[in-house]
Amino acid sequence: MNTRRLTITAWFALVALVAALPAADPPTPSDPQQRLDELWPGLTSEDLAARRVPEQQWQDFCFDLSRPGREADRTAACRAMAAKLAADTPAPARIWLLKQLQWIGGAECVDTVAAQLDDDDALVADAARRALAEIPVPEAGAKLRSFLPSTQDAAKKAAVIAALGVRAEEASVPVLGDCLSDSDAQVAAAAAKALGRIGTPAAATQLANARSQADGPLRLQIGDACLRCADRLLAAGQTAEAAAIYRELNAPGEPARLAALKGVLRTAGDRAAAIVLDVLAKDDPAAHRVAIQHVHELSGDAIRELASAWNKLPAEGQVRLLDALGTRGDPAGLSAVSAALDSDDTEVRIAAIRALSGVGNAAILPRLIDLMQAGGDAGNAARTAIEAVWAEGADEALVDAMKRTDDPGRRAQLIEILERRRAAVAVSALLQESLHDDANVRRRAMSALGQLAGDEDVAGMLKGLIRSSEGGERDEAEKAIAAVCARIPDDTRRVDVVLAVYQNSSNADRVIILPVLGRIGSDRALQTVRAAIASSDAGEHDSGVRAICNWPDAAVAEDLLKLAETAPDEANRIRALRALARVAVLPGDRSEENKLRLLEDGMRLAARDEERNLILDRAREARTVESALFAARFLDAPALAERACRTIVEIAHRREIREPNQAAFNQLLERVARTTKDANLADRAKSYISP
């Protein structure tokens, strides 16, 4: 019952809605003549705005007529439009009708459209030419050709010739050939371009005959047309005809010779390699570039042909060919490149080394390593090539070479290359190298492991850390291990992989491992670090201090403040203060006011200007007006004034802080402008002062 009531209600609501709608427009007439007559007053209006709607409506109507099955209506519409092209029709309306005929016109309108070619209004005549260029019936081309003898106006003749070029009909070739000898350069050039677009053997013959008689700019234009004609012949599969044109244009003194050389090479087939060698044997750098570009399109057999004849070229040609073989990357070129390594010419040797990055394999790496060790330009090129040889087994070959050398310098260099290559297969060997007797080898190995190792390798890296020397080497090793741990997605495992080793190590090794936990962070690590700081063992205590001073976030700010207050020795107190300045303002849950409070406490404890300036510098990250006022307290201290000035200006740079406190900032900024010795900083301060 309820459902039926809802249905009846919905029905009456729908009836009411339909009744309220405005009356629909009467249906659009389907008869083209009737529709055009209906729109004609608007189409012929002198008011541009008034013409826009009827023009669009007629265009849409014509577009609909272009669909299959509407041929009779299309013909009727074109006849109706043609009938309106009388001289008394306003020019804008005729131009619009001609544009529609350009899209949908056929034989039924050609005569009427052609009658507009010589219209006094240049825009109407142009619209007629464009229409005849596009109407897809032979009668349109015939009308354009018949118009040429009837006009002496060179510009009109050139425009009609261009329209014939668009149509690209074979029937136009004789007429256009005659125009090539026209006394007017504009007409002759247009004819050349049109014949190039037609691109048939007959068109090519006309162009060739005219080119032999032409000179100056016309010869250049005919040459361009010949090239275009050859390109069309080649695309149509008429390779022999195209090749003949390219060969004729590829001659000394011909403006189009370089473009023609491209065509010669494209049509040369099995002769392409011989042509490349012939070009490279001559002193013609521009032609060299064309020939080298074509090397990338040659077959493997052609590459072998080039490789077998490289040493017959002059040095410059050898360099260019070797570079091309390297870029091509075809192993067929390896024989030539390998042989060129023994060249007496330095540039050729270096080119061969460069090429090995593309064609080299694992077997060539020992030779490249020897060249790298020799140093100089060749050594630099060899190193670049080693880093870029991606052949199968290359990484393994480099690892083997690294293991076999007794030279620590070479060993470290190969480790660096493995790191740059991101050679994951080297990780096992690098873990061994992290225990090497040579400090530089150890450092390079740990750096590479920081990029390449995974969580399963952390235990091995910790052995390398224990083997490291105290100071810079150990700091770098800690950072490498922390970098690997940072890539472990599981926060718990990130700490566990280090804690597991730490808990099973001797006290001496724990002292070395503990700072790594500080670089990783987490609550679990912090418990261990705090216990170490509380230890009565001096070594363990110092290790805990180092760990907490390396902490990656602000969770230890209070610990650091306490340490700075209670540390029994100056070194650890300074270390804690500097760490406090770093972490106090790091992003987190701490408020800006709390950040500033920590910095103020640190400033109270700082005994040296180095730490005071560091705290002032970090105060810019506690983004409040109070931070600027804090910095202002040190504007009269000569050793701290510049850092205080910069902090105030950096805080003032933030409009959301400055503008609500503009009066206070104006006073601070005026003091900065008077105090700072940095003219640029003074100008910045003044720019932030506002009424």
Image (spheres, rainbow, N blue to C red):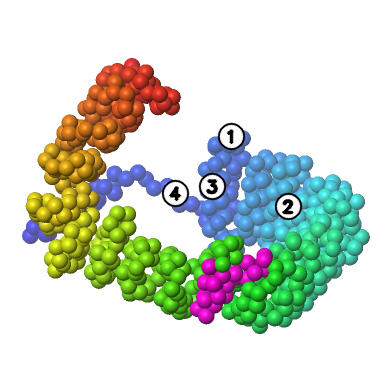
How many numbered circles are shown? 4
Residue type, label 3: Gln
Quickly name the residue at label 3. 56
Mark 2–mark 1 contact, CB under 8 Å? no
Q: Quadrant of the N terminus?
A: bottom left
Residue 528 figure quarter: bottom left
Does residue 284 appear to the left or right of 617 in the view shown? right
Q: Nearer the viewer, mark 4 or mark 3?
A: 3
Instruction: Measuring from the top left, give residue 439's x and y in whole percent.
Output: 36, 63
- Residues at marks 2 and 1, CA–CA distance in whole angstroms: 26 Å
The chief SS type of the magenta part is helix
Q: Considering depth in this image, is 17 or 561 the residue closer to the camera?
A: 561
Instruction: Measuring from the top left, give residue 429's x and y in whole percent.
Output: 35, 74
Q: Considering depth in this image, is 250 or 532 the residue closer to the camera?
A: 532
* Rendered residue at 18%/54% (across/down): 543
- Residues at marks 1 and 3, CA–CA distance in whole angstroms: 15 Å
- Mark carried by residue 102: none
Q: Which residues are magenta?
A: 346-373
Callout 1: helix, strand or loop? loop
Res 414 visible: no
| Relative height, residue 151 to residue 294 (above, below) | above
The answer to which of marks 4 and 3 sits earlier in the sequence is 4
Mark 2–mark 3 contact, CB under 8 Å? no
Quickly name the residue at label 1. 47
Residue 110 is inside the magenta segment = no
Residue 364 is inside the magenta segment = yes
Residue 409 figure quarter: bottom left
The answer to which of marks 4 and 2 sits earlier in the sequence is 4
| Relative height, residue 155 to residue 522 (above, below) | above
| Relative height, residue 663 to residue 448 (above, below) | above
Res 197 visible: yes
- Residues at marks 4 and 1, CA–CA distance in whole angstroms: 26 Å
